[in-house]
Image: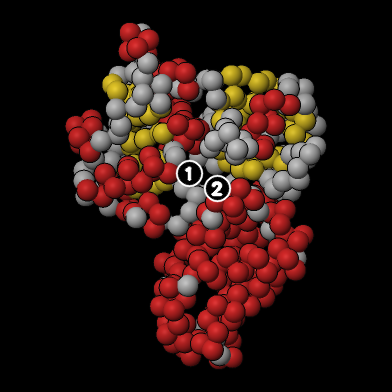
Amino acid sequence: MLSEKTIEIVKQITPAVAANAETITCKFYQRMFAENPEVKAFFNQAHQHSGGQQKALAGAICAYFSNIDNLEALGPAVELVAQKHCSLGIQPEHYPIVGKHLLAAIKEVMGDGATEEVLGAAGEAYGVLAEICIGRENEIYQQQKSQPGGWNGYRELVVDRKVPESDEVTSFYLTADDGQPLPDHLPGQYITVQIEHPVTPTSPRNYSLSDQPGTGYYRISVKREAGADDDTPGGLISNYLHDAISPGDRISVGPPCGEFTICPMRAADRPVVFLAGGIGITPLLSMAKTLVAAKTEAPIYFLQAARNGNVHALGSEVQELATQGTNVQTRVLYDSPSERDLADKKCDSAGMVSKELIQDWTPFATADFYFCGPKPFMASVHSILKDLGVDDSRMHYEFFGPKAELTA
């Protein structure tokens, strides 16, 4: 528990910290990577270069300080962090490293405002949060290990099949050949893939599991990430998986993690709407297939948005949902369809997801919404749902970065 004095001090410094949060997090990462380069392996450097990681941490710090006297409100945020940490293998001994450099960054940026009393309060606040996260992460590690075939760290799985899904997306079917089963995952969860790249050392990558649990394999559907322009390299690991990994190869995989999930029993109470943009189809398809397999009686609506037919991945599996469940409606939307797409009726309509579409096609007043996709898609959907009066408790999504980015 935090002392009353610490809570009071944290409340006093919250406006100053919020105003300088991104500067603080930039200084924090610079310090930590310089003095403790061993932790660099946990961080996706592409997110560092884009500023996404710094913004995400800044948002987390602001949320924590703003709720310093109501830590229960941080439950969902703590769960997200704990699941992410467990996917990367973060251990209790890493927390003092973060605390040391975070306090040093606060002192550097805030200058004379970072008195010994202020730093002491910030240190105490960080210590309490670290204890909460460590406790939850220990529970997750134990749950992972206790399942039949469960494990911590990395396990070598075999690429059983490699299936092209579109011009950009390929599915990899991963199986075990060590005599141990693959533990079931929750629909919507992801696994961590560790690739020893032959040229450039890199961090692990998270990929959503794109099929329902209980299949006997794990499937990830990976988009080949191209560079933004001719001078920008494409995604290091996504391109390596596409070009260098073949059936029969082995890759190191972490156990399923993630809090963006759905429970078929709880989903039976009201309609469920899935809105998938691009590669955001992967966790949502796993969820929808699980609901259909469980014979969920509640109405299910699944909208898949893509640029055109060339990059439309897993569309046949979305269509199958409607044939397997009488309560399922599906819709395909292309924002840049080709003439052939229109002639072949590959999509139901052309354009972007709009307020009118959601209003006319879904029971928006009562449904739970699950959405995932690129940032512009996410921001647009979030804005539309807010305009329609959908409460935050009925919006569920997976997005890298602080929520403020969706509402900006």
Which quadrant does the C terminus fall into? Answer: bottom left
Q: Which residue is depicted at the point 58% across and 58% down?
A: 82
Q: Is residue 275 left or right of residue 246?
A: left
In this view, which residue lies farthest toward the front? 231
Q: Quadrant of residue 377?
A: top left
Task: Say which mark, if any, is on residue 356.
Answer: none
In the displayed structure, 243 sits above or below 1; it is above
Residue occupied by mark 2 = 258
Three-letter code, disc 2: Gly
Point out residue 397 in the picture as x, y percentages from the top left corner.
42, 46
Q: Which residue is depicted at the point 63% across and 59% down?
A: 137
Three-letter code, disc 1: Thr
Q: For numbered disc 1, what is the local secondary structure?
A: loop
Q: Nearer the viewer, residue 305 or 316?
A: 305
Residue occupied by mark 1 = 261
Report, in whole angstroms, how far the alpha carbon at label 2 lies from the one at label 1.
7 Å
Point out residue 79 in the picture as x, y percentages from the top left corner.
52, 57
